[in-house]
Amino acid sequence: MAPQSSSHKPISLRTKLACKFTHALSRIKRERPTSSSFLSCSRRIKIAAYTAMAFSVGSRKSWSRALLYKLASPAGRRGLIRKRRFGVKKRKYLTVMSRADKLRRVVPGCRNMDFCSLLEETADYITCLATQVKVMRSVVDLLSA
Amino acid sequence: MERDFFLNAPTISIWQTEFQSPDFFVNSNYEKSTDQYTQFDSALSSLVSSPAASNSNDSSSIRELIGKLGNICQSTNTSCYTTPLNSPPKLNLPNLGNLIPSQPALPELSADPGFAERAAKFSCFGSRSFNGRTNQFNTNNAEYPLRSSSSPLENGKLGRISSSPALNALGSQVGVRENKNSPLQDGIHVEMKSCEESSVCVQTPLSENGSKGTNDSNSRKRKGPSRGKGKEPPLSPSPKATKVSEKNDESNRNGGVKVHEETKGSDSKPPEPPKDYIHVRARRGQATDSHSLAERVRREKISERMKLLQDLVPGCNKVTGKALMLDEIINYVQSLQRQVEFLSMKLASVNPGLDVNMETLISKEMFQSNDSLSQPMYSLDSSALAFTYGHQSQQSLHSNISNGSLTISDGLFAETHAQIAQFCEDDLQSIVQMGFGQQHPTGLPAFQPRASPVIKKNLKHPLELV
């Protein structure tokens, strides 16, 4: 028998990401003639990726909220594309706390959180990032094949 | 949200109130005079039996209770104050220096009318109790600005008794940083915190010339944890904290933390009162004061999350220890971010002139994700359909669909794609609809069975069943 249409079935994260990302990509492609430089194109695609991530998760997580705020302002978007300076630090002085601070710098939106919730946010961020990477890889494969 | 509010609130206030709260634990973790407990017992038994009722009633009896506790507390004032001299060198005095000036509100506690009621609610500690109590506070107190002088003290009381959030806030801020460096033994940690607290206890009466009002306020501030302490042998004032049962998180996690001391033989849990309590029991041979229990709860939460992360991050099974794990996690997150960047560059290079392929892209993505989607559908349908979806390959789907389980599978497909279509935007939706000729009639407003030449041209076999 045919099931009733229920809108409460969970849509997987991957599906959401795929939809958002491909849609953003199509929009970028439509606007492509204006932005001809390769770097700006890749930057836009990167922003599209983070946008897809943030919108698919919504306001549930702190990192997604922080990303959404960042994406809302152009200054924040520029900050997203920032070039990282890789400093060399002595391993000896990397205590657990400084590692937690490092983690706070890496995961967006977790500056003032305690260690416990920071770990939770990190787990969610990692799942979302990994799914995004998978989606992007499959898109690249589809487009290049 | 209140929890976030708490954590983002000026943590200095929470820390400062941590300092003000008294410390019986400092004297001796394991030597508790039974006198105090008998007094506590009698005073608190009624309170324990109905904390919910005490919300609005009996503020006068609560004040009597507070008075009693204050008298009890005064007797141990001196011993509390002597301990900071023995504080370990790790004591972070500069932080205290920052916090001492911001304690103007000590005498105000006695004047606070609602304080008695709020103090009466401190029959629990634990992270969930923290949330529960914050809700209570929000609903019960009209004046709840964290900026006010009295409320931070109460919040601190909350944080003092409830373990994880306030402690975590502290941990992120000040003193627990040293804790993380050292191996977290219960005794050291408790002693450190308690010494810090008691040292502030010293300074406040000194600053206020050790008046009786100060003593009263100090004793009143001590009420919270002493109350929590007093509840440790709630109904059986047995002296020692040696025999306890195993930890009991799962039962009754609504509000607070109640510590039970039980004899070794009795493994059965006592009849838990129907209140907001998280029952945390100290394990045998471990400290049972609220500090170490709260710390233990927090540590177990952290280790739980680290295990989750270990599963997420590949190659972390061999790594042991928080520090190395954190290194691995940081490296993994950075590598993922770099991969996103690299793939975006690759996409930018691959991109040119691929407008037509967007539909294929989208549909293929949907099918790839549908393979993962099909699994949750098992529970909904008959076993036949489950068998249908058991084969993750699209070919088997195709064959099954063509065999005649068409309506069901199509219905499901249509449903999922309806959801996806609603999720995505309009042009995408139209593309999806075109892909499926037969649809489930319910819930799909704009679903039209049409064949799109674009899709027919570009799609592979799964969509060809239209």
Image (cartoon, rainbow, N blue to C red):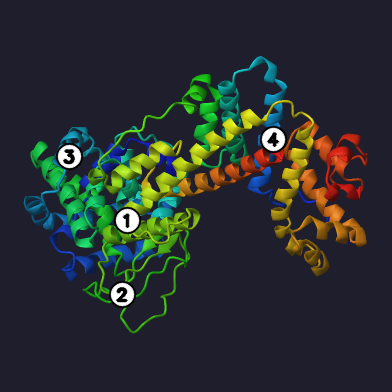
Q: Which amino acid type is marked by label 3?
A: Leu
Cα distance in 3D space between marks 1 and 2: 32 Å
Could you tell me residue B390's position as x and y percent?
Answer: 75, 64
Question: Which residue carries the number 3 mark?
Answer: B96
Mark 4 falls on what kind of element? Answer: helix
Task: Characterize the local packing of mark 3: few (<14), some (14-19) or many (20 or more) Cα atoms within 10 angstroms.
Answer: many
What chain is tagged by disc 2? B
In the image, what residue occupies the spot 63% across and 29% down?
A: B349
Question: In the image, are marks 4 and 1 on the same chain?
Answer: no
Question: Which residue carries the number 4 mark?
Answer: A22
Question: Which residue carries the number 2 mark?
Answer: B244
User: Quick check: can you spot residue A47?
Assistant: yes
Task: Characterize the local packing of mark 4: few (<14), some (14-19) or many (20 or more) Cα atoms within 10 angstroms.
Answer: many
- In the rendered image, the residue lying farthest to the bottom is B265
Q: Which amino acid type is marked by label 4?
A: Thr
Cα distance in 3D space between marks 4 and 1: 66 Å
- In the rendered image, the residue lying farthest to the front is A145
Question: In the image, are marks 2 and 3 on the same chain?
Answer: yes
User: Quick check: can you spot residue B404?
Assistant: no
Q: Is residue B109 left or right of residue B195?
A: right
| Nearer to us in this view, B118 or B82 | B82
